[in-house]
Image (cartoon, rainbow, N blue to C red):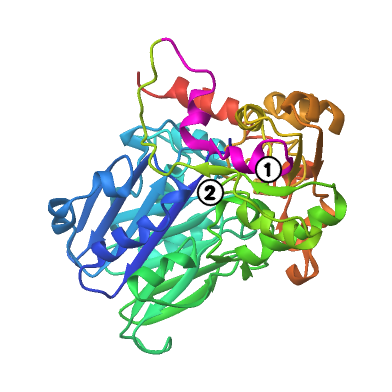
Amino acid sequence: MIREECGIFGIYGQQEAARYVYLGLHFLQHRGQESCGIISSDHTSLYKQIGLGKVSEFFDEVKLDYLRGSQAIGHVRYSTTGSPTLVNTQPLSAMTSKGPIALAHNGNLTNAMEIRRRLMEEGQTFSTTSDSEVILHLIARAPFQDIVQSTRWALAQLEGAFSVLVMNRDTLIAARDPRGFRPLAMATIGQAITSSAETYVFSSEDTAFGIVGATRQREISPNEMVVVNHGGVQSFSILETSPQPRQCIFELIYFAKPSSRVFDTSVYQYRYEIGRQLAKEFPVEADYVVPVPDSGIVAAIGYSNESGIPLSLGLIRSHYVGRTFIEPSQGIRDFGVRMKFMPVPEVIRGKRIVLIDDSIVRGTTSRKIVQVIKEMQPKEIHFRVASPPVKYPCFYGIDFSRPEELLANKLKTLEEIAHFIGVNSVGYVSVEGLFPSFLLDGKRFCRACFDGEYPTRVSDVRKESFDHEIQQASLR
Ligand code: SF4
């Protein structure tokens, strides 16, 4: 099971800004459920509320009333570096000689440890174990008084993945790293985008704009920093020369909502086309195409339409499983999977099933799902995967398992993988198949978890060593 990363949402120029961010974060909740937070500004002070749990669990009227002002940034988090404690919950904030600064960050930096070590040697103290904190310190230490110049100076030193929202009392900055690993889109409420007196909204995914009545304008470009303040909206480059973008293809495969457009591509259309491609590359005779809900649904529709095999919902997902549930003391085999997926006997019994999912990482969840289906006595199960085998770890903000735990690393042939999962056959879409013609240019995408070709230096960021070193350096 892949665990998600983070989502960020910000707004400038709207009364009750924090309540708008609260709504926006609801629509980004799929990107992180461990913690959430909002920082607002009324142009005199910053106001902060952060906590563990989902947005609807943590925030209440009292907390939202506290968050005054017409600009705010928010964050939902699943920790990919640093532990899931309150201290790492974002947005982060600091009092600096330039006034209070707040930061919300999605992505992982690949040179955070290097910068952290250097700053510590210079006497800087750190209060979190998150890689994001180095951004805040760099902004504070930049040789400028102005927040815009300071932020640009700080971002230019970073390597790896960052979509960020930076805010002080009267300015909001939205930026994407030069490779553009993580998405970030911009919208407006009200008048035309050239006006200086309207509301600007930023979100990891544009599907969150609808709930606040905002109209999508465009994506923040890789290597772009957009600044909004009383003077209107301005755009800057972070680096003088833009490198080749490497947007994360896994955002399209799995993370983003099918209702979103990320990297100027419809997530729904993308998954549908990959499902069709999968049917072309790995056809099989079967009675039903069955998606693993929710992640495999759109690809399964594509597979079904291309193959002519009818789609049927042979697995129903429970959406009412809370964060914690109590298991009988005797233990039930595959309890977690049984809580989540309920097989439909009428669809499965005696049938040949093509089971579709978006990806296989460790393979343990896939194996458990297959076990649950097998109890309904299908005739055959053929597993089809709408992404290539995941063989390499991600250092840009996605929490895959350690390399030695990745199924495609341990088992080399499709037959071995089919045997491990317990199905009649397995097929993965090819790396070439991930880039249908409407994506225009496959070179704009990172695919390092499939082919091991990382677009940045990663020598400093073997995840284990980062976590280990941080833990050694943190208070116990
Ligand atoms: S390594 Fe994979 S998951 Fe990580 S950024 Fe690249 S494509 Fe995305």
**Figure check: 406 above or below 242:** above
Residue 258 in view (yes/no): yes
**Residue 245 vs residue 474: left or right?**
right
Q: Are marks 1 and 2 in contact (CB under 8 Å)?
A: no
All told, the count of numbered labels is 2
Q: Residue at x 62, y 71 (%)?
A: 264
**Residue 209, image x and y in percent?**
41, 70
- The location of residue 318, given as percent across then percent down, is 45, 41
Quadrant, the N terminus: top right
User: Does residue 296 lie above or below 266 as drawn?
Assistant: above
Does dot 2 land on a helix, a strand or a loop?
A: loop
For badge 2, the amino acid type reads: Gly
Q: Residues within 10 Å of mark 1 (few under 14, many from 20)?
A: many
Amino acid type of disc 1? Ser
Q: Quadrant of the C terminus?
A: top left
- Looking at the image, which residue is at 56% across and 65% down? 238
Mark earlier in primary sequence (1, 2): 2
Q: Label 1: which residue?
A: 359
Say which of 143 and 46 sits in front: 46
Q: Disc 1, ligand 1: is the CB inside 8 Å? A: no
Q: Is residue 341 magenta?
A: yes
Mark 2, residue position = 107
Q: Residue at x 50, y 68 (%)?
A: 185
Left/right of residue 319 with respect to residue 276 in the rendered view: left
Residue visible at 34% across and 68% down in the picture: 11
Is 355 inside the magenta-drawn segment?
A: yes
